[in-house]
C-alpha cells in the first residue's frame, strides 16, 4: 500500500514536471519569436512593407487612370459625333487580372509587379492618345470640309448582304475579269436607298443599259457618291438632300444575278473603296465580317 502511494506520487510529480517543462518551452518560443526574427521572417516582413507601399501608390494611379479613361471616352464620343455623326462603339475593357487570374501558381509579387508595369504603360498610352486626340481636333478645325460620307445607303443591312468591292473582279455578264469601281450590296427589289451624306444631286440618269438608273450626289470636301441599278428615283437634279434621306429604291434587271445596289464613292473623280467609309455604321464585329466578305468575293454582280 505504501509502495503504491509512492509510485502514484512519483508519477504525479513527473507529470507536473513534464507539463511545466512543455509550457515553459512554449512560452520561451513565443517570447523568442516576438523579440527575435529569423532571416526568412525579416525578409518577409520587408517584402510586406514594400507591398503595402506599392499598393497604396497603385491605388492612387488606378484612380488617376480611371479619370483619364473617362476623359478619353468623352473625347472619343465627341470625335465620332463630329466625324461620323454617330456614337462611338462601346467595347468592354479587359483588365490584366482577368487575363492572369486563372493561374494559381503565380506569386503575389508577380501580380504586384505586373500590375505596376501595366499601370506605367497605361499612363504612357493615355498621354499618347490624349496628344493624338488634340491633333485630330486641330485637323477638324482646319479641314472641316473634308469629312467623307460614312453612312450605309441601306438600312438594317447585314454583312451577309455584302458582295464584291473595288478591284479586278469576274464579270458575270461578259464572262471576263475587269475593274469593278463600287460595292455590291444585295437587297430585295424595292428596298429603300438613302443618301450616305448631305449634298446636292448632281446627276440623275434613267437608262436600261450599263448600271441602269443612277443618282449621283456631290458632297463637301470633293466627295461624290453614286447609287446605281436603281428602280424608282425619288429626287431630281439640283435638289439638296440630307443624310439618310430616301433617294430611290433597289431595282432589278434580267442581266444581273440578283437585285442589288451598286454603290460608288469618289473623291475629286478618283475611285475610293466604299468599304473604308462604312466602319462608323457597323459594329466592330460586323465591319470585320464585311471586310472579309469583300476580300473573299471575286465575282461582281454587275
Image (cartoon, rainbow, N blue to C red):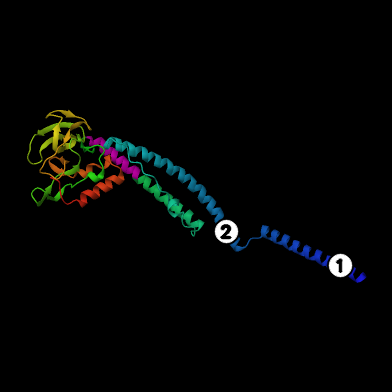
In the picture of the structure, the residue carrying the numbered disc 2 is 44
Left or right of 108, for residue 265: left
The dot on residue 41 is: none
Q: Is residue 130 magenta?
A: yes
Q: Residue 38 in the image: x percent, y percent?
A: 62, 63
Residue at point 46%, 43% (across, down): 63
Q: Nearest the camera: 19 or 226?
A: 226
Dot 1 or dot 2, earlier in sequence: 1
What residue range appears in magenta?
129-144
Q: Residues within 10 Å of mark 1 (few under 14, many from 20)?
A: few
Residue at point 49%, 46% (across, down): 59
In the picture of the structure, the residue carrying the numbered disc 1 is 8
Residue 147 quadrant: top left
Q: Residue 54 in the image: x percent, y percent?
A: 51, 51
Q: Residue 225 in the image: x percent, y percent?
A: 16, 38
The C terminus is located in which quarter?
top left
Left or right of 96, for residue 76: left
Q: Report the mark closest to the observer, 1 or 2.
A: 1
Q: Residue furthest right?
A: 2
- Gap between marks 1 and 2, in whole Å? 50 Å
Q: Under tag 2, what secondary structure?
A: helix
Left or right of 14, for residue 31: left
Residue at point 67%, 57% (across, down): 34
Q: Nearest the camera: 208 or 13?
A: 208
Residue at point 14%, 44% (across, down): 271
Amino acid at each position: 500500500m505504501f509502495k503504491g502511494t509512492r509510485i502514484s506520487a512519483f508519477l504525479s510529480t513527473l507529470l507536473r514536471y513534464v507539463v511545466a517543462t512543455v509550457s515553459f518551452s512554449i512560452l520561451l518560443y513565443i517570447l523568442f519569436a516576438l523579440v527575435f526574427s529569423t532571416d526568412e521572417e525579416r525578409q518577409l516582413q520587408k517584402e510586406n512593407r514594400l507591398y503595402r507601399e506599392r499598393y497604396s501608390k497603385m491605388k492612387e494611379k488606378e484612380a488617376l487612370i480611371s479619370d483619364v479613361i473617362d476623359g478619353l471616352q468623352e473625347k472619343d464620343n465627341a470625335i465620332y459625333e463630329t466625324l461620323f455623326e454617330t456614337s462611338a462603339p462601346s467595347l468592354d475593357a479587359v483588365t490584366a487580372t482577368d487575363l492572369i487570374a486563372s493561374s494559381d501558381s503565380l506569386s503575389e509579387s508577380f501580380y504586384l509587379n505586373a500590375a505596376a508595369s501595366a499601370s506605367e504603360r497605361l499612363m504612357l498610352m493615355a498621354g499618347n492618345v490624349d496628344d493624338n486626340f488634340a491633333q485630330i481636333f486641330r485637323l477638324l478645325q482646319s479641314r472641316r470640309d473634308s469629312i467623307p460620307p460614312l453612312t450605309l445607303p441601306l438600312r438594317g443591312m447585314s454583312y451577309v448582304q455584302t458582295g464584291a468591292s473595288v478591284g479586278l473582279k469576274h464579270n458575270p455578264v461578259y464572262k471576263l475579269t475587269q475593274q469593278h469601281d463600287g460595292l455590291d450590296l444585295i437587297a430585295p427589289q424595292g428596298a429603300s436607298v438613302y443618301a450616305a451624306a448631305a449634298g446636292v444631286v448632281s446627276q440623275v440618269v434613267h437608262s436600261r443599259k450599263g448600271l441602269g438608273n443612277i443618282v449621283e450626289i456631290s458632297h463637301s470636301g470633293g466627295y461624290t457618291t453614286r447609287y446605281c441599278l436603281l428602280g424608282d428615283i425619288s429626287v431630281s437634279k439640283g435638289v439638296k438632300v440630307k443624310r439618310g434621306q430616301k433617294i430611290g429604291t433597289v431595282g432589278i434587271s434580267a442581266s444581273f444575278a440578283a437585285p442589288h445596289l451598286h454603290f460608288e464613292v469618289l473623291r475629286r473623280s478618283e475611285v475610293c473603296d466604299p468599304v473604308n467609309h462604312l466602319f462608323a455604321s457597323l459594329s466592330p464585329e460586323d465591319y470585320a465580317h464585311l471586310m472579309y466578305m469583300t476580300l473573299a468575293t471575286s465575282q461582281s454582280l454587275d
